[in-house]
């Protein structure tokens, strides 16, 4: 009896300590028993982890019963630091800052540089570290010192195998001489980056003119403030059919930091028109299209450009009258297009700024503030009632998923796709009431069942299948003994959270399951905690969880053999099920078992003795 009690105490002690190790994430600890003593084996990553394991075990059993057989992993070998030296030279002297190998020191560097500072002290804030000198460091420092001696106003940054030099010259000729001197001293195997600038002329006005004809485009003038700006302008010009070589003068006097943005947009607009010229004089832009450009295209391109230009720039756009065909100009129009992503483009003509503001405000209220892009032109003498027809068209467009409304003087046309079976009749009633019964309009709207919200609602079983398909591809796993959502489990919850908004109408259960290792009650608590963790993780992702419940089943519902590691891994799972299905199974399980009525035995029927008949 005493042996049995001691054995039971031994088993419970090992079980409690092993579970505590898993809860603390100390899965490197192996727990065994030696009589009534608990023995800890394993290799701790550091001394703090070893102390934590011993302390946790001592909190569950008497400290005298804990045998510490834990090792501590050897500390990682320290890697050398990244050495760097930055040297700055100007009229005030020379300053040094950085980290260099101790064997090189800084005394020789300071002594050498003091001869260049015209009596000023060399300020050194260099630190040293006792590590070997890295390969390429000495020639890089020597070249850096040579550059500092050559350039009166400069900054030299030295790292292993690389030297970066920034300097200012007095003239383009001096810049050329500096570059030649440094190039001759360039050491082998060292990457050298030279950024030596020369004075820039003042350009006034800051001018650019680009001509695009049938044979391509060319610059008649081009100004830029930096090399990067020049590169952006030339790239945009190549997209606008630039022919031959071109360059831009770099100078001072730029009217806006967004000069390159304005030039890129204007060259893109000119390319869309096909032919014409664009001229910049500081912040004033003149865009002249060829007389062959259609009025509708001109209105659309100019409207988009005017809306996109930075605020400081002013656009004047001209479409010359046609002189070759004698054909009349097309009728005025207004177009609103609704894209699949919800974006709305407004183009065409509006009478004045007040109407333009009203149309923009109405469209933003209908489709969303950030979804609307305005690219209209202000033109006088539009037909009577034009603003009313524009607003009615936008209202009608709001009944569609995608589509377009186009307004001309004698007709309003609307076309597109919708998920509402009553959209056509709704739009017809709307336009009749807004424009009058005699209004002329055309409706070409297609009903698409896939766009109908009612047809998009998934069936309950479909919701469960979609979620469990995610879990089949990547299981929700927990760290040993833990109930916290780790990074990999969080990624799976992100995928499930993307499905659940379409399944708010489906009551579901989040079931937690374990293998058969450990006590049954402990496994049931662990599975419930993990199911709760999944539920809380979904709530943290802003998912409404009113249709979800969490339940821990412990080891009671295995789906594989607990006698193998693969089987136990399969049994440790999170599973989604329909709540109706769960309730039905629970009801069947709750019914009392009754014995089947015994079948009546076979009773022989006496027959008359034939011999006595």
Image (cartoon, grey):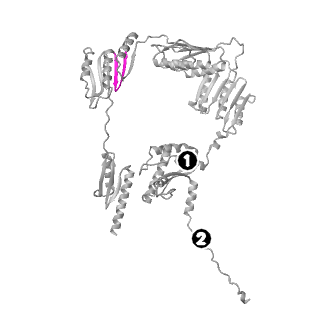
- Does the magenta-highlighted stretch encompass residue 154? yes
Tell me which segment is drawn in magenta: 153-168
Residue with the mark numbered 2: 596
In the image, what residue occupies the spot 46% across and 51% down? 530
Q: Residue at x 44, y 45 (%)?
A: 486
Q: Is residue 94 visible?
A: yes
Q: In which image quadrant can residue 588 be found? A: bottom right
Q: Quadrant of residue 428?
A: top right
What numbered label is drawn on residue 469?
1
| Residue 171 within the segment the image draws in magenta | no
Crowdedness near tag 2: few (<14), some (14–19) or many (≥20) residues, C-alpha within 10 Å: few
| 194 left or right, relative to 394 | left
**Residue at the farthest front position:** 188
Percent position (x, y) of residue 552? 48, 55
Q: Is residue 311 visible?
A: no
Give the quarter of the figure containing the C terminus.
bottom right
Looking at the picture, does residue 597 appear above or below residue 259?
below
**Outermost residue, bottom side:** 612
């Amino acid at each position: 009896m005493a042996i049995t009690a001691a054995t039971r105490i031994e088993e419970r002690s090992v079980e409690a300590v092993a579970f505590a190790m898993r809860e603390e994430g100390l899965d490197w600890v192996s727990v065994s028993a030696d009589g009534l003593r608990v023995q800890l084996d394993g290799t701790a990553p550091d001394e703090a982890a070893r102390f934590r394991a011993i302390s946790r075990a001592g909190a569950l059993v008497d400290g005298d019963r804990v045998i510490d057989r834990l090792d501590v992993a050897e500390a990682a070998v320290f890697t050398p630091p990244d050495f760097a030296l930055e040297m700055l030279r100007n009229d005030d002297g020379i300053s040094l800052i950085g980290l260099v190998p101790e064997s090189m020191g800084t005394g020789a560097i300071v002594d050498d540089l003091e001869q260049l500072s015209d009596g000023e002290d060399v300020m050194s804030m260099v630190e040293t570290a006792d590590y070997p000198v890295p390969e390429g460091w000495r020639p890089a420092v020597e070249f850096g010192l040579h550059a500092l001696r050559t350039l009166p106003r400069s900054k030299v940054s030295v790292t292993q195998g690389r030297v970066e030099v920034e300097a200012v010259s007095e003239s383009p000729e001096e810049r050329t001489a500096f570059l030649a001197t440094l190039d001759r001293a360039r050491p082998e195997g060292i990457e050298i980056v030279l950024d030596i600038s020369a004075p820039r002329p003042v350009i006034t006005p800051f001018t650019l003119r680009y001509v695009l004809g049938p044979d391509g485009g060319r610059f008649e003038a081009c100004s830029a403030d930096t090399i990067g700006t020049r590169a952006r302008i030339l790239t945009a010009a190549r997209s606008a059919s630039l022919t031959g070589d071109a360059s831009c003068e770099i100078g001072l006097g730029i009217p806006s930091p967004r000069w390159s943005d304005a030039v890129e947009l204007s060259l893109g607009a000119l390319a869309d028109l096909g032919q014409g010229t664009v001229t910049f004089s500081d912040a004033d832009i003149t865009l002249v299209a060829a007389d062959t450009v259609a009025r509708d295209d001109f209105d659309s391109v100019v409207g988009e450009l005017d809306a996109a230009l930075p605020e400081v720039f002013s656009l004047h756009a001209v479409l010359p009258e046609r002189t070759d065909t004698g054909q009349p100009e097309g009728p005025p129009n207004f177009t609103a297009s609704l894209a699949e992503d919800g974006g709305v483009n407004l183009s065409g003509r509006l009478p004045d700024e007040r109407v333009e503001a009203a149309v923009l405000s109405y469209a933003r209220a209908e489709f969303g503030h950030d979804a609307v892009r305005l690219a209209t032109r202000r033109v006088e003498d539009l037909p009577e009632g034009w603003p009313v027809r524009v607003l009615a068209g936008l209202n009608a467009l709001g009944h569609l998923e995608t589509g377009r409304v186009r307004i001309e003087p004698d007709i309003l046309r609307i076309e597109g796709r919708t998920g509402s079976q009553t959209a056509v009749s709704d739009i017809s009633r709307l336009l009749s009431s807004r424009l009058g019964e005699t209004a002329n309009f055309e409706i070409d709207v297609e009903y698409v069942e896939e766009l109908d919200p009612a047809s998009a609602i998934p069936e309950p079983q479909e919701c469960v299948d979609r979620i469990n398909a995610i879990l089949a591809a990547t299981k929700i796993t927990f760290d040993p003994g833990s109930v916290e959502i780790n990074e990999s489990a969080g990624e799976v919850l992100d995928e499930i959270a993307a499905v659940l908004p379409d399944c708010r109408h489906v009551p579901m259960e989040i079931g937690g399951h374990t293998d058969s290792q450990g006590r049954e009650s402990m496994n049931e608590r662990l599975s419930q905690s993990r199911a709760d963790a999944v539920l809380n993780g979904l709530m943290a992702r802003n998912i409404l969880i009113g249709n979800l419940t969490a339940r821990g089943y412990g080891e009671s519902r295995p789906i594989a053999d607990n006698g193998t590691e693969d089987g136990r891994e399969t049994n440790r799972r999170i599973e989604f099920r329909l709540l109706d299905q769960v309730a039905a199974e629970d009801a069947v399980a709750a019914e009392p078992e009754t014995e089947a009525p015994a079948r009546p035995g076979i009773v022989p029927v006496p027959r008359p003795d034939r011999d006595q008949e």
